[in-house]
Image: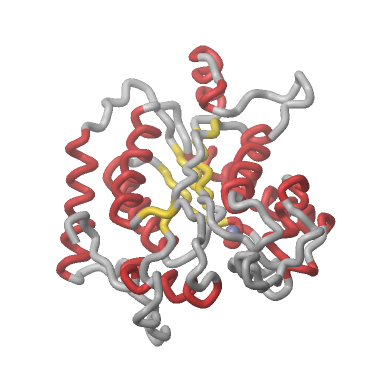
Amino acid sequence: MSNDSETVSKVLWAELFPAELIKRQQQCPIVYMPLGLCEPHGQISAFGLDTFKAEYLCTRVARQVGGIVAPSMNYHVHESGPSAKFLEANVGEHNPYMSSVPPYVFYHFFLYQLRSFYNAGFQSAVILSGHGGAHVHDLRKISRMFQEQTGMNIWYGTDFDLVEGTYTGDHAGKYEISMLMHIRPDLIDPSKKALEELDGAGGRLAAALDADEATRAYGELICDACELALSRIVTELGLQSEPATNRLPLSYGVVEGLWSQIVSSAESGTEHWAALQPREGQAPVSEQSRWKPYEYIRMQTNL
Ligand SMILES: [Zn+2]
């Protein structure tokens, strides 16, 4: 994300002056939010791979098509429901050094992030997550609820969605490691063995079996395809957008009303929330595993 040329426009909300933000917003009233987290991607990769993918794509597309990139969210849903078994199988009992939070914290806060975009006058929000999992289903549903309530258009997806059918996404395999090699080559250490499982070396840490096949050239192809697909989505959203004039700000009450609906639908079982329990047919987490407490959780803080 280096600004190596003076002609490259500033697109990060955090870097804009008020007059610059207003001008960019009038030209294209779209906000992007990159989502990721710190989680293990093998011994060869930095923890923030998922966030770097999302930030890279949002920033590139904002520069080309327009719009403003909101602060990244570097904490995300993992551990719970289907992820508990994934982590037992792929990280085991090693410390994962992971910036994960429970669904009921993330989803609640996510509504407030959308509220801040609405109140800042954006007509459309593009939420791009570099991290996949069961939460994608839940966050799409929450995005739809917010859109129906407020009229702000929201696209929620992952980089895997952007290239579905062309490239197969993975976790810390050929796909993801190649992308980070292209985006931030300094954050991949090819001298370390991806599949190292030596005692004392911290284990495989969720590297996929084909991580050794990653190349920078392959990563560039994937990144370019993601960028093109995201540009198309944003262009389409932009066409639906009209300037937000004299919009009344949303209060906390509107968000809390949506949140109550989410909690009660989870408690009563009238809506399926995918990150709260294992997938159908998924093997149970071992009783002694550090991941066992997160296999089944509820949509509320006082568990
Ligand atoms: Zn990842």
Number of numbered discs on residues: 0
Q: Position of residue 170 (x, y in %)?
A: 63, 68
Question: Is residue 170 at least partly visible in the picture?
Answer: no
Q: Is residue 107 left or right of residue 123?
A: left
Residue 214, horizontal then vertical, whole percent: 78, 64
Which of these two is toward me, 191 or 65?
A: 191
**Residue drawn at 73 percent across, 45 percent down:** 184
| Residue 201 appears in the picture as rendered | yes
Rendered-image quarter of ligand 1: bottom right
Residue 37 horizontal/vertical position (percent): 51, 50
Q: Residue furthest top?
A: 19
Q: Is residue 284 above or below residue 36?
A: below
Q: Is residue 279 left or right of residue 12?
A: left
Out of 251 and 51, give the one closest to the viewer.
Answer: 51
Picture quadrant where residue 205 is located: bottom right
Residue 190's image quarter? bottom right
Q: What's the residue at 20%, 70% (across, down)?
A: 270
